Image (cartoon, rainbow, N blue to C red):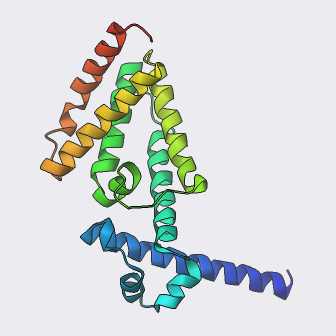
Amino acid sequence: MSKTTTEVGWREARREAARAKLLASAWEMVREDGLGALTLRQLAKRAGVTTPTVYAYFDSKNAIFDAMFGEAAEAFAATRENLPDNGTAFDNLVADARRGLEFCTSDIARYQLLFQRLIPDFEPSSESFAPAVRALDLTRENLANNGITDPRHVDLWIAVFTGLVDQQIANEPGGDRWTRLIEDAVRMFLAHCSAQPPE
């Protein structure tokens, strides 16, 4: 390996480590004080660098949010992949939903970034959004295994799922008052969908 190639690899590794440190600091900030607390000046202070150094790795606050969104979406997609077989399509849907609820309620800032539009003028890039699309495709697959293919019903499922998360984090963070209803919600949802003629 040439010296030039070694230097390029070292520089890239150093750059990625610096970006990772800034992102870790950004996550700490938003988990402590909410998404609105993130400022480049405060991020630089927390990470122990100057504000211009932050700009060397991210050209704007939205670029940081985009990288955070990509990390969060990748982690969410990972919860949907390679799920164990729980016996029936119904059991698999309940287990998938339970796993998703645990992911969402375990980190409120991450959930808000992924599922709620709390940051004015922020839209994730197509690259950062791609894992979220992959996660939705896996959800559609799980629903299809239960005979749910109507797009209206997919939308309804997302509303039921996020509704349980929203109620849990708004009214009993760390508890299970709403998340324990997931099996009832799945039964109700499937019964409703099976009784509805396709549009």
Tell whether 40 sits left or right of 74: left
Which residue shows up at 44% across the image and 48% down it?
76
Tell whether 43 sits left or right of 140: left
Residue 61, x across and y down, in percent: 46, 73
Residue 24, relative to residue 85: is it above or below? Answer: below
Q: Nearer the viewer, residue 16 or 121?
A: 121
Tell whether 17 sits left or right of 105: right
Q: Quadrant of residue 89?
A: top left
Which residue shows up at 32% across the image and 34% down it?
159
Residue 192, relative to residue 65: is it above or below? Answer: above
Q: Is residue 87 visible?
A: no
Can you name the residue that lies furthest to the right here?
Answer: 2
Q: How many marks?
A: 0
Quarter containing the N terminus: bottom right
Q: Nearer the viewer, residue 135 or 115?
A: 115
Residue 114, x across and y down, in percent: 40, 52
Which residue shows up at 35% across the image and 27% down it?
156
Residue 144, x across and y down, in percent: 48, 20
